[in-house]
Image: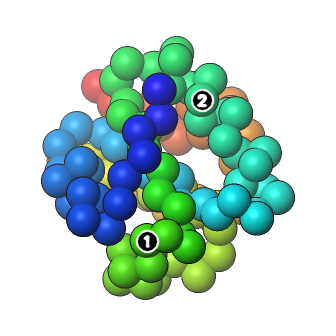
Amino acid sequence: MVDVITDQSYEEETKSGVVLTDFWATWCGPCKMQSPVLDQLSEERQDVRFTKMDVDENQKTPKDLGIMAIPTLLIKKDGQIVDRLTGYTPKEKLNTILDQYTD
């Protein structure tokens, strides 16, 4: 399951373990393509937490992180940003990238 997070909950929700956050918007075509990929991976991978943040409803966090385009996938490990992917990322590529950060 992909958890919805907000500006207020972002730091707390992404401070431990491997967490992927999808920064998206309802009007964004590539975001709509990315969403089912994340839904599938969230069912298959118990070693990664999947979250998403609507950039229209939550503008502070994307601004603070310098996110200029969506979808942007941010991967954090124990609270530190370890990777940033902008644009649609296919499932196989995303799986390979996540494998780098999980034990």
Q: Nearer the viewer, mark 2 or mark 1?
A: 1
Q: Position of residue 101 (x, y in %)?
A: 36, 39
Q: Identity of the amino acid at label 1?
A: Asn
Q: Position of residue 15 (x, y in %)?
A: 18, 51
Q: Earlier in the sequence, mark 2 or mark 1?
A: 2
> Image check: 92 left or right of 73?
right
Of residues 14 and 97, which is closer to you in this image?
14
Furthest residue in direction front, as rendered: 57
Q: Is residue 20 visible?
A: no
Q: Would you identify the image quadrant in which residue 90 lies?
A: top right
Q: Is residue 19 above or below residue 10?
A: above
**Mark 1 residue crowding within 10 angstroms, few (<14) / some (14–19) / many (20+):** some
Q: Is residue 74 above or below residue 77?
A: below
Residue assigned mark 2: 39
Q: Would you identify the image quadrant in which residue 58 lies?
A: bottom left
Secondary structure of the residue carrying tag 1 is loop
Of residues 40 and 77, which is closer to you in this image?
40
Q: Position of residue 19 (x, y in %)?
A: 34, 43
Q: Position of residue 76 (x, y in %)?
A: 32, 52
Residue assigned mark 1: 58
Q: Is residue 77 above or below residue 67?
A: above
Q: How is the image coloured?
A: rainbow
The C terminus lies in which quarter of the figure? top left
- Which numbered dot is residue 97? none
Q: Identity of the amino acid at label 2?
A: Asp
> Image check: 71 left or right of 20?
right
In 3D space, how far apart are the residues under numbered discs 2 and 1 (Cα atoms)? 21 Å
Q: Is residue 25 visible?
A: yes
